[in-house]
Image (cartoon, rainbow, N blue to C red):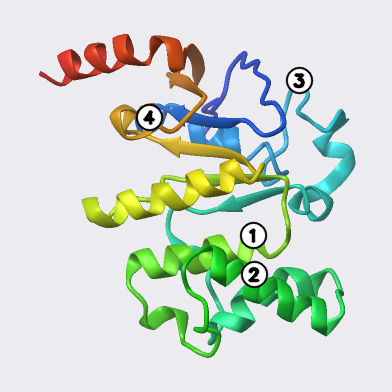
Amino acid sequence: YPSGVKALNDVSMTIYEGDMVAIIGQNGSGKTTLAKHFNGLLMPTAGEVDVNGLPTKDQGVFKLGQKVGYVFQNPDHQIFSETIFDEVSFGPRLRKLPEDQIKGRVEEALEAVGLAGMEKEDPFTLTKSGRQRVAVAAVLATKPEVLILDEPTKGIDVGTKSEFYQMICAFAKQGLGIILISSELPEVLGLSDRIIVMRSRKIVGEINRETATEALVLSMSMID
């Protein structure tokens, strides 16, 4: 960063096709910075980040965006259109798809997030959860291979969180790769195949389903 802070240091990891992976850590641990390297929002100052075997610096943001979709923590930083249809159709239209394909992709994406039939609505009249679903739909409409969700349930009530995570699990069952960024270990333990733990700008460990129960006990004891 311009201040001289190195946001990531000596990080090495692999995410496989169809993985459902969570990246957890406290604020400032480097998890969002790491995830932004996966679709070219950030480029490494040293080392290399590969997507499908090719360095991200050789692919660029536009090409990477077709493979790796990114949903920001705050949907208001992503949504800019006056109607849900215009918002969700932006990506396909940017890629110059035919209008009938664009319409089909919008309908499919809105169906997937539970907003079918709301194409003419103003996204800014929706709740935080509704706006987050619009942001997810906008990324889904580009047909990515991997979906990154940055703290997607922050500021959402418990009941709505459960619905949102059910939706994400449905995407994973359909073969979409999921990278879930979170600061809450208990929330992601039952969802993810693997959990990558970050601290002080480094990866310090990994949790899988076999060690999940032990990790939850440790987490709760740390909270206590």
Mark closer to the observer (2, 1): 2
Residue that label 1 marks: 140
Disc 4 and disc 2: Cα gap in Å?
27 Å
Q: What number is the disc on residue 190?
A: 4
First in residue order: circle 4 vs circle 2: 2
Pick the front one: 216 or 41 = 216
Asked if the residue at tag 1 contacts the one at tag 2, i.e. Cβ–Cβ closer than 8 Å, the answer is yes
Asked if the residue at tag 4 contacts the one at tag 1, i.e. Cβ–Cβ closer than 8 Å, the answer is no
Q: Amino acid at mark 4?
A: Gly
Mark closer to the observer (1, 4): 4
First in residue order: circle 1 vs circle 4: 1
Picture layout, residue 34 above or below residue 205 = below
Where does the image place residue 167, in percent across and percent down from the top left? 46, 53
Residue that label 2 marks: 108
Q: Amino acid at mark 2?
A: Glu
Question: Which quarter of the image is occupied by the N terminus?
Answer: top right
Q: Residues within 10 Å of mark 2 (few under 14, many from 20)?
A: some
Give left or right: position of 141 versus 189: right
State the SS at label 2.
Answer: helix
Disc 1 and disc 4: Cα gap in Å?
23 Å
Q: Amino acid at mark 3?
A: Gly
Where does the image place residue 222, in percent across and percent down from the top left? 19, 15
Q: Which quarter of the picture shows residue 54?
A: top right
Residue that label 3 marks: 47
Q: Which quarter of the picture shows residue 190?
A: top left
Which residue lies at the image location 54% right of the left edge and 80% below the top edge? Answer: 84
Mark closer to the observer (3, 4): 4
